[in-house]
Image (cartoon, rainbow, N blue to C red):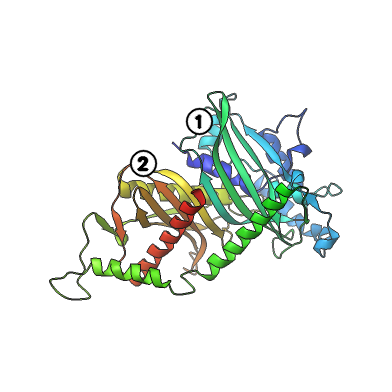
Amino acid sequence: MFSPRVLKSASSLMCRGFSTGQMCRQGKAPDMAEVRNRLREIVGASTNWKDHQQALAERASLSQYLAQSQDELPAKTMKDSAIEAHLPLGTQPALREKYLNYHNSVRLLICYSHTWNKELKRSPLSIVTALVDKIDMRKNIIYPDCDIKFTGHVTWVGKTSIEAKMHMSQYHDGAYTDVLDATFVMVARDPENKRAAFINPLKLESPEEEAIFQQGEINKTRRVELSTASLLKVAPTAEERTLVHNLFLNTLDTRTVSFRSRILPPNSVWIEDAKMKGLEICHPQERNIFNRIFGGFLMRKAYELGWANACAFAGCRPTLVAVDDIVFRKPVEIGSLLLLSSQVCYTEGMHIQVRVHTEVLDPLTRQHSTTNVFHFTFRVEKDIPAIVPQSYGESMLYLDGKRHFDETMRSQG
């Protein structure tokens, strides 16, 4: 069974990393303690809550080291950011509980290796996750007692943003097998995380690297096109409008000839009846190095609720197929009340598309602010009921879910 704790560990590795070449001992990949300690040195963070706040406040003085343009920075290669790290769950049993059942996990910053200036003791950049573009599962089972290997590197850069890819594999039956592939987009900010900051350009050294970089350009264009065509901005296509109208016609009660009288078709579930909600209080132990709630914690909580929603809907345990298009719209502060709402929004065959919306509630003003929207594709080993919208808003949720499902199927085809 796929562990949500490992999802968090994997996602945190994808978000941020630095080259193992900077910290390997006698050619060995670093262990997790070395990874975390090195990261704290680069950023200037502390494990102590009080010292941690003071260290981050002192980062403001690092603004003097920021480049005024990208031209001032030396180009880096993909090899400069290449990492390999191991999670020895098989050879070190004591780690199993920590990394499968404990909230804090791997923090390996690929992007800091691309931007690292060896002349500086600390990095003036605050690198934060902007988007989880895609997580594709290659294997449904992750073994709790077998070693895991993470590899990854920077694949594309703009002036202030970075795309990084990560691959995760696990040692089983004498060989490493693929577990997941993922693509993250990060942005560089100033030391106080208030404005954008320039990053090093990327130097391409082979036709293979040029092809990888070009795919990054394609990914960027696709993201812009998807945002432009969002159902929150423009009307559905003609084909989608026809689909929605056919769904409406299939729910009309022919005996009454009324727009208001609706009946549920056989083997179907109203979309209103396929929801699940959750609440989390965000404690300091879930903070990242920038004193905000760690994005991997948010992903894990959203995954757990989405999985439970799909499980309750299907009546059996689902497996994760893909995660895509997770935009980090707003940071979550320590002490926040985090509200999570999960919705089964589309089904097809044995697949379930789930959308999880997260928002923070300010108890003083009672205002809600969206922080993330997560899209999960699950699969079960049996046919499942069709999901049926009633209102126009629910129909847009349905179409949005279908778009994400179709994109996942295309990428895996």
Q: Which mark is residue 144?
A: 1
In the picture of the structure, the residue carrying the numbered disc 2 is: 317
| Front-lying residue, 172 or 59 | 172
Please give left or right for residue 290 compared with residue 199 in the image: left
Percent position of residue 334, x then y? 57, 55
Which residue reaches farthest right? 119
Percent position of residue 253, x then y? 17, 69
Residue type at mark 1 is Pro
Please give left or right for residue 319 compared with residue 24 in the image: left
Percent position of residue 74, x then y? 84, 54
The answer to which quarter of the image holds residue 340 is: bottom left
Is residue 23 at least partly visible in the picture?
A: yes
Mark 2 or mark 1: which comes first in sequence?
1
Q: Circle 1 — which element?
A: loop
Q: How many marks?
A: 2
The answer to which quarter of the image holds residue 406 is: bottom left
Residue type at mark 2 is Arg
